[in-house]
Amino acid sequence: MTVKAIINGLPVEVAEGTSILEAARKVSVKIPALCKHPDLDHTAACGICIVRIKATGRTLRACCTPLENGMDVVTHDPEIVTVRRGIVEMIMSKHPNECVTCARSQNCELQTMCADFNINTTDLDNLVPNIPLDDSTKAITLDARKCISCGRCIQVCQENQNVWALTFMERGISTRIAPAGDISLAESPCVKCGQCSAHCPTGAIVEYDEGPAVWDKLADPELHCVVQIAPAVRVAIGEAFGFKPGTNLTGKIYAALRRMGFKAIFDTNFGADLTILEEGSEFVERFAHGKGVLPLITSCCPAWVDFMEKYHSDMIPHFSSCKSPHEMVGALSKTYYAEKIKIDAKKIYMVSVMPCTAKKYEIQRSDDMKSSGYQDVDVSITTRELARMIKQAGIDMQAIPEEQPDHLLGAYSGAGTIFGATGGVMEAAIRTALKLVTGQNPPRAEFEVTRGLKGVKEGVLEVAGKQVKIAVAHGLGNVEYVINKVREAKLKGEPPPWDFIEVMACPGGCVGGGGQPYGVTDELRIARAKGLYQEDQAGMWRCSHDNPYIQKLYDEFLGKPLSEKSHHLLHTHYTARPLYQR
Amino acid sequence: MPKFTPAELDAHKAKLLAAAKKKAIIKVGLNTCGDAAGALPVMLAIKEAVAKAGVDAQIVKTGCAGMCGIEPLVEVSIGGAPATMYGQVTAEAAREIVEKHVVGGKVVEAFKVPSIAEMSSDKPVAGKQYRIVLRNCGVIDPESLDEYIARDGYQALKQTLTAMTGEQVIAELETAGLRGRGGAGFPTFMKWKLTRASRPGEQKYIICNGDEGDPGAYMDRSVLEGDPHAVIEGMIIGGWVIGASKGIFYIRAEYPLAIERIEKAIKQARANGLLGTNILGTGFDFDLEVRLGAGAFVCGEETALIASIEGKRGTPRPRPPYPAQKGLWDQPTMVNNVETLANIAQIVLRGGSWFGAIGVGRSKGTKVFAVTGKVKNPGLIEIPMGTTLRQVVMDICGGTTTGKPVKAVQTGGPSGGLIPASLLDTPITYEDLQKLGSIMGSGGMIVMDESDNTVDLSRFYLDFSIDESCGKCAPCRIGGTQMLRTIDKIAERKGTAADIAKIKRIALTMQRGSLCALGQTTPNPVLSALRYFESEWTERLLPAVKK
């Protein structure tokens, strides 16, 4: 069904239910809007997108008003522009004038809006509230003074992620965002996924910045600083340097990190390959040998682990005991690598560069994260922080030649790369599971059923004549459906609906992570994922078990997957945690 | 308890009407207003005096008769003679009234005030009170189902369920021209029709909006307290017409007596087969529950009200989808105001054309107002639409208490505006009030005399609206406070002409950019004060700097 209407005197035909905001694009109009985000249902909060309905003369919000048959809409006239300007001016009267010292400067939707409306002077009173900063999680920082009450963070936290940490407190002019009950974020159900920061139009929610701390460590001559980069970082960081979304900058990032002073450049993709060997073996144990319960659920996403421990702790027996890849690389850097280069592990300072804010929390989530005898990963920074550090160092990403990683913990297969996209862990695991069960590599490495942005992807794969039922969920809001089906089957005493489940907290998986460059949309998620799949296809090795450095690691150090040493260094435990920590 | 069938309801009514009457009937107004004025000790004094004298008298507690300025009110009727109303009755006076009037048969002139019958007309004439909504208020015991039944109670329900179709009821409402009495004036038949047509067969809800909150307005409270069954009957008919099996009374928690009486009436109706399963033996199932509002003014807005019932933060959401499409728990829902619902049974019984003949233009029927401020006779009045403001202020309410001339009348509460004395001949209709920059609103009417200042008055209303802004949308959340700051500057005689322009600029942004009616109408009191009393503002400005 379509509707036919008039916008600015021009005929428009769109699908029924299309908002005026979207429909206006057909007549080359981008209606200014501040609270509407393409990922999210409208919040209708700002009012900047007002348009006039000719028949009634009334102004309505374009973001939330569907175009109707016969509607005659005007998207701008002098009064509408005056009102839009008035709203931006009002919002600014309650927003701190701290642009130059704000993490979102030059990348702020409010700042852009102010520039467009040239809000340079105002006769409105300054109404900026005095609300203390909340950096209690040491993962994301909430500065409620900078909040414009657009409601995106609450929408994404409650509706999309189903976490329900953030809400509006008080009302009227005193309205502010805060964890429900006015406790700190660390005490709230927050899982640090950072989707709030990814969707915030201003600097009200940003990552906890560790850039200066990393520079300090790099300056310390006693320390041996090493670094690893996660799969999704390489296809997103380019956006901060003018590259097309999805451009793979792996070699340039290695080079930049080396020039910043890191002594060894590792890759989390190596850890991903290792995870596959451990988790793949775990799956085969459970699936083929009946040791442990099915389905097996992936554990490489720390926000998902936190969410599970808080909301679905009955799923603990289903969880893979594998640590996440960067923790594995961290533990090995302070054991295997330290032994190899004969350095005291306490001098090693491991930095992980992640698309993720939850990794900042994960590095201290339990004593298992100190399996090397030291904290396995000393600090975790986001893609956004690394981009800033590269700029601080003055490194020209366009010009810098590509380099290689330190292969010992840096070589990787295509299976490791695709960990960064939703479904990638599943696809990589199945490639290796096939080998483990049949002794042969899969005839075709691609499993399309795991790819794409559908919220829950389900499928059946053949492994040695047996059917493996899989499910892939991304975006925590999609998890409940999967978990409930598992519970239902358990209650009824039926076989589990799936044998293997992958969950990533962020929509799109890590490419859409809470620590990635701002402005994420599905279009960007697809482009970034494409960058990863291209690298997988072009790579020398498609399967984790084919990575010779992984084989070498087992030969020289770990023995075999699920060995005692593996368990000590690469695996962890889970515990039910209260939603509210006080 | 008997569960009424239609025939049994009629038989019961006939029995009630035929029952032997006591020689004397003494009524004491015991709504919140009467109680606050001290009607309970008066009631006790009357009981004692009657017992002592040994007279054959029935003592009835009633709802509010409307004359709130002269509570406690006691009405005496002997042997079916026209009733005498006494005002400002003390316990002592009550004993005297029993002794001299009830026992002695002689009216006590010292306390006599006009009775309800004397105050109102039995024909709908502009300028005179005419009671449809308030017909039972102050007349019957609101806690007695029998008294309601004796006054044609549940006859409209019987007629609807046994002799009408939903379309017929809607057609009557269309002929009647009834519009929403909550303030916006949306045609009621349209709301019923849309909700009836929406997703047939699915769970639907009808909600009574009892979240009255305008400063000085208490029409809905008085109706809920004084005639709860009339609202319930309207709800059941509405539920049947739209196909709902559940209705919810959303009443603000600050109305404990209204809640108590509605809950009591619901139980009575349920026990007598008028509510619950198989209503009047017709197979129609419908039940009611009461939910309390937590004190946010904005929850009078229907989408915020629905959010509040769902346990969410009470903030409005954009429409469409309208509640008729997606309301409570995403199901088709119809939200009607208390006064709107109190009209329903009478329209069904007496016909849409009867109702449609009352009033003028597109404003039909009557409207209840709570008239307060500087009038001699403050209180609750019900007048046919088209009555002028002057008739209300001067004729019905007796002019100002101070003897000073009327300066302005404020209608529509914080969403309405000031109407200057020069426009008092304006007829009260939705359209006429809107033309003047005010609104009909839910029925608050505040009268000011020459000693009141409109800068301070509009500041009061603005302050109220700012306090009640939910904070969801930027224009309302921030604009109100910015406007208030500017008015304060002017009030402190520090403002300039630029500040007047700034107020108007902020007002435009709020009117056009706010999501719901609260924010869109917040500037109204200020704008109307500026429009009609500009000199009161400019005289406070700093003199222009000479260049």
Image (tube, coloured by chain):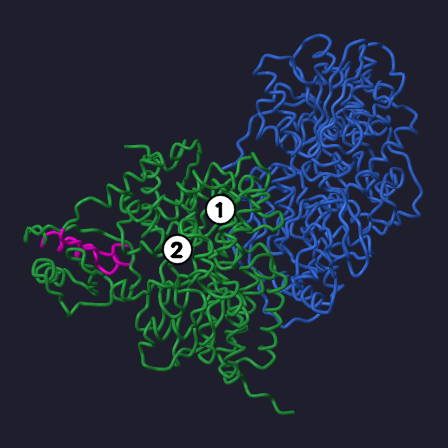
Q: Relative to residue A44, is residue B293 drawn left or right?
A: left
Q: Which mark is residue A497?
A: none
Crowd tier of the residue under label 1, counting other residues whose Cα lies within 10 Å: few below 14, some 14–19, many 20 or above: many
Magenta span covers which residues? B23-49
Chain under disc 1 = B
Q: Colour of chain A?
A: blue
Query: Which residue matches tag 2?
Result: B220
Residue B27 within the segment the image draws in magenta: yes
The residue drawn where x is 86% and y is 36% is A531
Chain shown in green: B
**Callout 1, which amino acid?**
Val
Q: Which badge, 2 or 1, is on the more N-terminal residue?
A: 1
Q: In the image, residue B37 lies at what x, y percent?
A: 24, 61
Q: In the image, residue B233 lies at what x, y percent?
A: 39, 45
User: What is the spatial separation of the Cα atoms under label 2 and label 1, in whole angstroms?
Assistant: 24 Å
**Number of numbered labels in the structure image:** 2
Q: Relative to residue A166, is residue A287 drawn left or right?
A: right
Q: Which element is circle 2 on?
A: helix
Please tell me whether residue A558 is drawn above or below residue B166 in the rendered image: above
Crowd tier of the residue under label 2, counting other residues whose Cα lies within 10 Å: few below 14, some 14–19, many 20 or above: many
Classified by dominant secondary structure, the portion drawn in magenta counts as helix
Q: Quadrant of the N terminus of chain A?
A: top right
Query: Which residue matches tag 1?
Result: B169
Question: Which residue occupies the foreground of this view, A580 or B128?
Answer: B128
**Callout 2, which amino acid?**
Asp
Q: Are marks 2 and 1 in contact (CB under 8 Å)?
A: no
Q: In the image, residue B80 lies at what x, y percent?
A: 18, 56
Q: In the image, residue A7 lies at what x, y percent?
A: 77, 58
